[in-house]
Image (cartoon, helix red, strand yellow):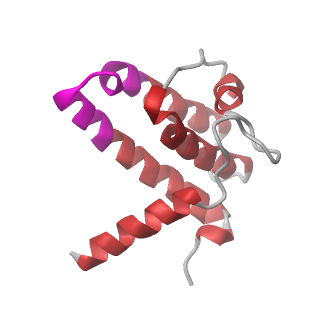
Amino acid sequence: MRGLLMIGAAAVLAGCVGTPSVNGGFGAPSLVALQDMCGAQPVNYGDDAQPVYSTLFDAYVASRHGRISKPDFCAFQVSIAQRYAALGAGGGETRGQWAAFFNEQRAKALSWRAAVDPTLRSG
């Protein structure tokens, strides 16, 4: 149990380090710019905008460093947008399903970024 807590805390801290605001900055693209890269219609994620941006930004960094291809980055982005449209804006059980899906995607994006960004690796 303690190990799971430590992993969760590390994931939260890793997500906070080096992620700009949804408006971008310091050379980082904004959330809208990330969506434009794939020709996607911008999605309004409401209160989920910052965590979604952090996830997409991590995947973007991995893509820029060759860990995932641009088509894979765009497919990842589309899957999040589609799930959010179906589940994220709802309440109750659908909101819980969105949270479970999103947490899986967040972990995936963090692992992609950690593979190319030494600041996210432990040790």
Q: Does the magenta-highlighted stretch encompass residue 28? A: no
In the picture as drawn, the residue positioned furthest to the bottom comes out as 123
Residue 22, placed above or below residue 32: below
Q: Is residue 77 left or right of residue 98?
A: right
Residue 37: % across, % down: 71, 27
Q: Nearer the viewer, residue 50 or 56?
A: 50
- Residue in view at x 50 percent, y 38 percent: 52
Residue 2: % across, % down: 25, 78
- Residue in view at x 30 percent, y 71 percent: 5
Q: Does the magenta-highlighted stretch encompass residue 98? A: yes
Q: Is residue 59 left or right of residue 5?
A: right
Could you tell me what secondary structure mostly forms the magenta stretch?
helix
Residue 39: % across, % down: 66, 18
In the picture as drawn, the residue positioned furthest to the front comes out as 47
Q: Nearer the viewer, residue 4 or 105?
A: 4
Q: How many marks?
A: 0
- Residue in view at x 53 percent, y 20 percent: 43
Residue 87, placed above or below residue 110: above
Q: Give the magenta-colored segment's residue range.
A: 82-100
Residue 57, placed above or below residue 39: below
- Residue in view at x 39 percent, y 26 percent: 84
In the picture as drawn, the residue positioned furthest to the top comes out as 41
In the picture as drawn, the residue positioned furthest to the left comes out as 93
Q: Is residue 63 left or right of residue 108?
A: right
